[in-house]
Image (tube, grey):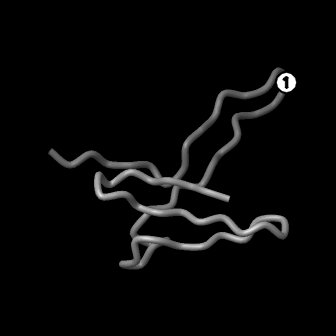
């Protein structure tokens, strides 16, 4: 069975604020066939890896 995934998710609003929408990216778009990518965030480099079991691991 195929499950449709939304392009964004709505998070519950903080008191007095409208719900926030968060973008959803497919891992295949990010990894593009690789099993490991590097992500630079605020000057630090992180490694994101797909495990043999298909799970994601993020390490600094």
3 lies above or below 26? above
Q: Position of residue 55 (x, y in %)?
A: 38, 51
Q: Nearer the viewer, residue 34 or 5?
A: 34
In this image, 18 relative to 16: left or right? left
Residue bearing mark 1? 16
Q: Say few, some or many: other residues with alpha carbon within 10 Å of mark 1 (under 14 / 14 to 19 / 20 or more).
A: few
Dividing the picture into quadrants, the one containing residue 18 is top right
Q: Residue at x 72, y 71 (%)?
A: 40
Can you name the residue that lies furthest to the top here?
A: 15
13 lies above or below 1? above
In this image, 29 relative to 44: left or right? left
Q: Residue at x 41, y 78 (%)?
A: 32
Quadrant location, the N terminus: top left
Q: Nearer the viewer, residue 49 or 6?
A: 49
Q: Position of residue 31 (x, y in %)?
A: 45, 73
Quadrant location, the C terminus: bottom right
Q: Residue at x 54, y 50 (%)?
A: 8
| Kind of element beneath mark 1 | loop
Q: Residue at x 36, y 78 (%)?
A: 33
23 lies above or below 38? above
């Amino acid at each position: 069975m195929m499950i449709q995934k939304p392009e964004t998710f709505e998070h519950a609003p903080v008191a007095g604020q409208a719900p926030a929408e968060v973008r959803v990216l497919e891992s295949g778009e990010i990894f593009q066939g690789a099993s490991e990518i590097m992500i630079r965030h605020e000057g630090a480099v992180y490694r994101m890896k797909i495990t043999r079991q298909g799970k994601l691991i993020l390490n600094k």
